[in-house]
Amino acid sequence: MSRSLLFVGHTGERSGAEKVMLMLVDVALAQGRRVVVACPDGPLAEALPAGCVRVRLPRLGMWGQTGVGRIAGLAGLPVRWLVGARRLRRVLAAERPQVVCNSLFALPSLRFAVLGTSHRERARWLVHDTLSSRKQRIVARMGKGAVGEAVAVSQASAVPVRECGYPVVVALHGVPIPPSLSRPASPEDSTARVGILASVTEWKGHRVLLEAVAEVPGVHLDVAGEPFPGDEALLDELRRRADDPDLRGRVSFLGRVDPAEVFAVWDVMVSASTSPEAGPLVALEAMAHGVPVVGTDHGGTAEYLADGAGLLVPPGDAKALAEAMQRLMSDPGLRYELAVTARRRVEERHDIEVTLPAMVNALWATGVTL
């Protein structure tokens, strides 16, 4: 009988990392494995499929706190890590599972859990972060004793993890590929639509994008996505900025959306993150649907959009972002060229029918047929 699998996540929210974990959970269940998911309360727990066992963890990271709340949150992290470790320790002792850690900030809990049990098999860490801050690197080093191998989702995310002393293999992200590029060309007299599809949180670059759109007349911006808990004030700030005269009537806040529906009407998608992303799934999804992408020139975004698959701009540079959007709006031929090149890039490197089995093999198996 196949061994059970334990997936560990630090947050109960749902973003790209959790979307990937849910796909992996589905694969494991389809293989007939017993699946245990340890995560905090929230949308992720609510989305878990029937058939898997859920273990409740406290929040193992930060969640948008500012000021005194941030200080209190940081001070409480060690306690939450230890509480999480105690709960994970019980699972390790009872299940003797293979372990997939889906989150950087779950590593300390996992490390403390391993210290307190006879379960000595090391986990695999699926790396969804490009370690760009001292805090991230400290947390990564804290987890080393619990991890046998890191599985990075891009070459960009692999480099700093190797620098922290981990053995690393790369298993690229993938997305489903629609049958064809079928987006109709926008009428010449229509308003160009630019979109961002991302959780509303500080580092996703929404402020920079609003300032850039303010410099590009004739463009309408769709802001798709919801704030993480603790980031509601940022959404209110963005709404107030969108009501200023230079943007009034040109910004829509859509909340949670079906990506396929917005990709069908967007002329350009922007990935404006001010900190490097390991591998933004939404960029690959837009590329697969034929939506030209403008992204910030770091992390996995730069990797995805290199060599003509998109336009890259310096992070945090509203002027450069405005110029890139203006260039695309005024050149339908360039938009089409980027769309074709991007689609080819996804077909060659990021087809989920190829990448998901490869990721499964890297994380817990060899020779798996899905």
Image (tube, rainbow, N blue to C red):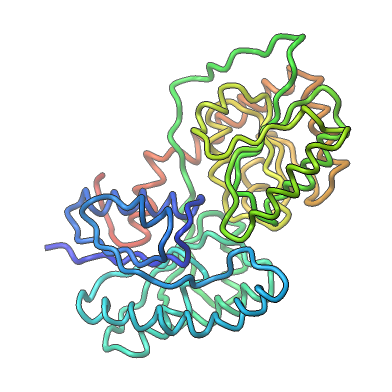
Name the quadrant of the C terminus. top left
> Is 224 left or right of 123, judged from the image as shown?
right
Q: Quadrant of the N terminus?
A: bottom left
Quadrant in the rendering for residue 187: top right
Q: Position of residue 254 (x, y in %)?
A: 60, 35
Question: Which of the 4 image quadrants contains residue 307?
Answer: top right
Q: Nearer the viewer, residue 43 or 239?
A: 239
Q: Position of residue 303 (x, y in %)?
A: 64, 47
In the rendered image, the vertical position of residue 243 relative to residue 314, given as above or below: above
Q: Percent position (x, y) of residue 174? A: 46, 43
- Which residue: 34% across, 54% down? 360
Left or right, residue 202 beside residue 59: right
In the foreground, 222 or 158: 222
Q: Is residue 156 or residue 251 the one in the foreground? A: 251
Image quadrant assignment for residue 329:
top right
Number of labels in the image equals 0
Q: Residue at x 26, y 76 (%)?
A: 91
Q: Is residue 238 left or right of residue 326?
A: left
Taking the image as shown, residue 308 lies to the left or right of residue 164, namely right
> Is 106 situated above or below 232?
below
Tell me if residue 49 comes above or below residue 6 in the rendering.
above
Q: Residue at image x 60%, y 83%? A: 75
Percent x, y of residue 257: 52, 35
Q: Residue at x 84, y 36 (%)?
A: 322
